[in-house]
Image (cartoon, rainbow, N blue to C red):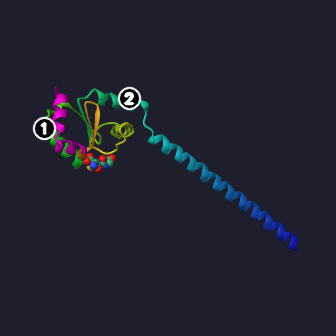
Amino acid sequence: MFELLDIKYLAVSVIVIAILKNVLLKEQKTTTKTRISNTQSEMVSAAVIQNVKKAISSSKIFVAHKSYCPYCHATLNTLLKDKKIPESKINLLELDTMKDGAEVQDALAEISGQRTVPNIYILGKHIGGNSELQQLDKEGKLDELLKEALA
Ligand SMILES: N[C@@H](CCC(=O)N[C@@H](CS)C(=O)NCC(=O)O)C(=O)O
């Protein structure tokens, strides 16, 4: 009688362990898949990086910005209103409204090490964001740079 019960318990235990093992294995597989797809979605394609580099190097002034960003508004105010740079002389990329803006932002982060906007380049040289632009202006170096860019 006892022996029969023991065998029953043993059989039930083996089944429970097998089910648990199966569930754990399935969970592990899903986690690995999620990690792989996350990595892939964070990758910027070489073609996009190449295109962004080309846009930077072929622009006298390059500003990646976002429509709602107050730092971007300050930068554009400085360049367009204070410094009277014609809009046609600035390569303006509005990342939140353009197609592929998120990818361009990823590429910019890769190229310049800066993820935030505005992301400013003058004559292919990375200036930084709005703080750096305003600092250059305070130091009296911005006018010279802009003059050189528009010469
Ligand atoms: N210190 C920076 C601040 C820029 C900043 O924080 N920009 C925000 C938008 S207003 C940003 O880029 N956030 C991340 C994002 O939009 O992806 C500067 O002066 O440019």
Q: Which residues are magenta?
A: 132-151
Residue shown at 32%/36% (left/top)?
99
Q: Residue 88 is drawn in which quadrant?
A: top left
Question: Label 2: few (<14), some or many (≥20) within 10 Å?
Answer: few
Q: Which mark is residue 83?
A: 1
Q: Nearer the viewer, residue 52 or 25?
A: 52
Q: Is residue 7 above or below residue 34?
A: below
Query: Horizontally, is 14 left or right of 112 in the view?
Result: right
Callout 1: SS: loop
Q: Which mark is residue 50?
A: 2
Q: Is residue 146 magenta?
A: yes
Could you say where residue 119 lies in the image, as x and y percent from the top left? 28, 40
Residue shown at 53%/47% (left/top)?
35
Residue type at mark 2?
Gln
Q: Is residue 114 magenta?
A: no
Q: Quadrant of the C terminus?
A: top left
Q: Residue 13 is drawn in which quadrant?
A: bottom right
Residue shown at 18%/41% (left/top)?
76
Q: State the residue lying farthest toward the bottom.
A: 2
Q: Nearer the viewer, residue 127 or 57?
A: 127
Could you say where residue 150 lies in the image, as x and y percent from the top left? 17, 28
Callout 2: SS: helix
